[in-house]
Amino acid sequence: MAKKDNFSLMKVEINELFKDQFLIELSNLNLVQLKTKEKQIIKEEFEEQKPFFDRIKDLRKNLDILLKRLNINEFVLLGLKVDDSERIEFAAKDLPELINHIFEEIDFYINRVNELKSFVAKGTIELENLIMLKACYRNLEELNFAKDSLNDINQFKFRIFTTFSKNLNNLKNLFDFTEFPNFYWTFEISKDRLGFCIFYPKDKENEFNGRIRLIHSEEIPIVKKYFTETGINHIRIDKEINFIERMLLRYYKELNRIGRDNLLKFAGINEIVQNIEDYNWANQQFERKSTNHVVLKFFVPYSKINYVKTLLFDKFKDKISIDTIDISKKDPTIETYGLEKIKKKKIKIKPKPKEEPVKLEEEDEDLEDTQDLREITPTIMKNFFLTKPFEALTRMYGIPNYSEIDPTPIIAITFPILFGIMFGDIGHGLTLIIAGLIGGLLFRKRGGDFVSFSWIIFFCGWASFFIGFLYGEFFGLHEIVIFGNVLWHLGPITIPFINITFNDPLNNIMSVFYFAIIIGIFHINLGWFIQFLNYWKQHRKYLSLSDSLIKILLLIGGTVLIFTYGFDIYTWFSFPYPILLVIIPSLLLLLLKPVGKLIGISYFKKESYGGLIGEGSLETFDTVLSVMSNVASYIRLLALALAHIALLYAINIMVNLIQGEGIGVEIVNFLGLLFGNTVVILLEGLLVFINTLRLHFYEFFFKFYQGSGIGYNPFHLDDKFSIINFRAITERDIISEEIEKEIDSESIRGEIDKAYNYIIKKYK
């Protein structure tokens, strides 16, 4: 019979020459989850191979630099649509050769891009200088400046500068004529920069240089090639500007071309680098078996065992050997190949005369020290499509252990109910239904937890909608009103069996209070019942009876005691002594574990009687206290329900304060109701959601759920843009190769055959 959701541990021994191909095949399967080695071993290996790991980090660093310089982000690469036939193939002998190949590819493009960037930077500076020079020279035309004018100035120095516009006042102070003889004028170049020309005596050169440095100005050179006999040669300046602009345009086009034409290659390289990081991690999980053989262990879904075996044997034939262990969810399973299940039972064997006693008990003790494979086996969370969105809540607490029950189907029922009790309103329920439906459908392709939470809101909306009928609430009103028309008066609805109604909770507080307490008791007992099932499923039946069942009886007994006899202590100790409903389960919780050791229950045998009694005492005391605090915690159901309804009443009262007739008053009332209800839905809804989550995490999950499992994450290398092809390397027999070199003719082979036959006959 198929074992649903069970795993097997597969151990494969393979020739080291084929391990790269082997990992690629496992990746293509997308079924197996590698068993990780101990952290200490990985740490030691990391120290030995640190240079290799650093090289992989450098590979990622260089790729990030390349993509950044080409203005390509990862979202652009991941958004590409590529046919399988267009994928880039990267062939190599092994991982180091693949890394070297990728390094060469990346370095080639980095060097080319750096070269173009350098040309662009130089050209940009030259262009800016020419544009600045042109602006300054244009202002010299007012002086009729020509080539001969430069030679006519004997006693004075003429220079041109640019600076920031904010330095204008400093410029005036520095070159005040009374302090420093000069003549200058300024002109605007751009919004934040200005230029100025200045004449000053040549013998004041040193003083001028000291002053000009204070305003951080930049000098514009006076180049004679830009002057003619009649004035400034604007044509030459414009030609040089046009030439540099065309040159820069070519550089930019080349940069864009590199990014555009090689986008698929960069996507493939980016994917390969990610795969190398994942592949390197997988490569570390191999264990050395012998000089040229390695071992890899991985988990495979039980239903796929034969498929995986057949594929691997077909691909590698006699180059691999495979062993498997089926991992049971019920029984402890250790990593002893050939023995799939080993139950830890204390067995006594009577020794034969004159022989050493068989110490099987010591072997059992060693066996118990061995790690149970269930602790490291991944878990597949498989739920019905209606309950699957609630997996997001379960994962927030933790993934189920391999051997424990997945609580997702349970919270798919309890979570909306508790939410609805605190947020019960027909109108608000409909709002949540519509919002959740829109989110779930609109973002269904996006997937992930966002869509899951949209559907959770959808289901919570239905719970709020139906409980709104019990409360008789529609946007805080006791009747369903649409556009001023009363469609339905929300009268009281009587609950069968308990014969009470929750209509108008503000005036019916005690009924809702008792209902909240009953819900809390049921919810806590449900948690212990699931714990009971977990113990029973794990073949720890005595513990399920002595722990979980007794706690359920304790809570039920306390509930009957309080609800029937109240808090009258004298009545508790009077006939028929109802206090026994609490005392008897407490004594059983205290004593049943030591009794279990006495009768030989295996999982108590290492414990001492004193330890079990002490543990039982603390557990009994803690259970009694926690039950009271846990049940009291469910009073928040009443508190938040009343707060929700009171807020709606307050909003309706405030809106009704606006009196008058006409469409203007109607619009104001409508907007007031819309704003008020929106605030309540958002803020109160968030508060209710958080408290519902808290009741499940701290009052419910804590009773039975560990959530320390490992998610099923099969080893897989992405192949959307790239293909890794490790070439097969055949083993070489050196002796055979040397013989083949020596024996290169049929005559020599014949002589050897004659000698061989002679020796056989001689010494037969």
Image (cartoon, rainbow, N blue to C red):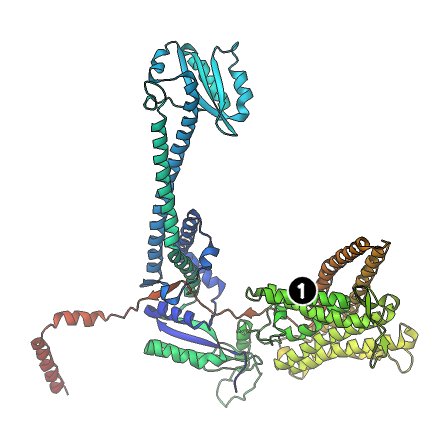
In this view, the residue in front, 355 or 260, is 260
In the drawing, does residue 450 fall left or right of residue 38?
A: right
Residue 499: image x %, image y %? 86, 79
The image quadrant that residue 514 belongs to is bottom right
Q: Is residue 144 above or below residue 421?
A: above
In this view, the residue in front, 435 or 413, is 435
Disc 1 packing (10 Å; few <14; some 14–19; many ≥20): some
Q: Residue at x 46, y 63 (%)?
A: 41
- Count up the numbered dots: 1
Q: Mark 1 belongs to which amino acid?
A: Ala
In the drawing, does residue 34 fall left or right of residue 537?
A: left
Q: Is residue 311 above or below residue 132?
A: below
The image quadrant that residue 696 belongs to is bottom right
Q: Quadrant of the C terminus?
A: bottom left
Q: Residue at x 38, y 17 (%)?
A: 145
In the drawing, does residue 582 fall left or right of residue 744?
A: right
Secondary structure of the residue carrying numbered label 1:
helix
Residue 460: image x %, image y %? 70, 69
In the drawing, does residue 231 fall left or right of residue 498?
A: left
- Residue positioned most to the front: 662
Q: Which residue is mark 1?
A: 435
Q: Residue at x 24, y 70 (%)?
A: 732
In this view, the residue in front, 749 or 290, is 749
- Residue positioned most to the bottom: 353
